[in-house]
Amino acid sequence: AAFLSMTALTVVLFVWILAVVPDFPGQPRGERPKLLRTVRVPGVTPVLFVTLVFVLAHTILYAYIATFLDDIGMGGSTGLVLLVFGGASLLSIWIVGAQINRRLRLLTVGGAVLVAVAAALLAVQSDNTALVYVSVVLWGLGWGGVPTLLQTAVGDAGGEHADAAQAMLVTLWNAAMAGGGIVGGVLLDALGSESFPWTVGLLLLPVIAVILYARHAGFPARRPGAATPHEPFVAGA
């Protein structure tokens, strides 16, 4: 009863904030909320969609990785698997940091494809220990730079509404993490942990499709204002 009461009060508060509280100090009465204008900016919605579904897919498996490994007979290797994943993620972050100005679109597509391939390998070769580690390396390489890529993409797409777009991305990111835990728990009870990689792969199909579709706004080949390979970037230019 206590939790239900808190939920009901939170919903009431949420509705009241949306209806009455301005988005920012000095917002004129009757002006449409900034968030509604932001989602109409070309490119913002595709990035937010990719954020929601990509993070959901990742979390479904990541939140229950110990259970998944235990079910395939690798429960004692959870620490090592996570270490390999972390190392690959660090390498991914370095690559993305070095190349994001010129290859944001390619890196985002590549990240989603690598995670999808890793999920496919785990789905069909989870009894092969060596291929499990290969899958984890691909997963880390695909995932590590994703936060940087998506935050950069939504900031670029949002333009003058970048602050609101970034706030929406963070909200959806956390909602997707919570949703991944819930969906993973339901899948675990209903179908077992072997359903995790299949679910991740299926969820990443629309993610890849949206990234490819949003080539003009959302995930362009090059960031606006980025230097060409023969033109050094000058801050403020």
Image (cartoon, helix red, strand yellow):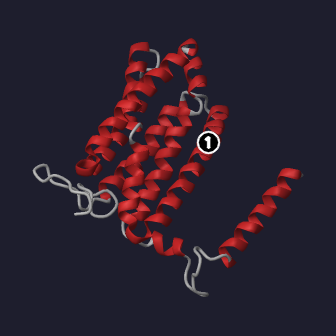
Q: Position of residue 74 (x, y in %)?
A: 54, 14
Residue pointed to by mark 1:
183
- The front one of 103 and 225 is 225
Q: Which amino acid does label 1 sit on?
A: Val
Residue lying at the far left in this picture: please name it: 230
Q: Residue at x 81, y 63 (%)?
A: 9
Identify whether 129 is placed above or below 116.
above
Q: Position of residue 42 (x, y in %)?
A: 36, 69
Give the image quarter of residue 111.
top left
Q: Which residue is drawn at 82% across and 56% down?
A: 6
Identify whether 13 is placed above or below 139.
below
- The front one of 131 and 220 is 220
Give the image quarter of residue 107.
top left
Q: Residue at x 38, y 40 (%)?
A: 145
Q: Which residue is drawn at 65% across and 39% down?
A: 186
Identify whether 103 is placed above or below 154.
above
Q: Where is residue 69 in the image (x, y as percent from the top left)?
A: 55, 20
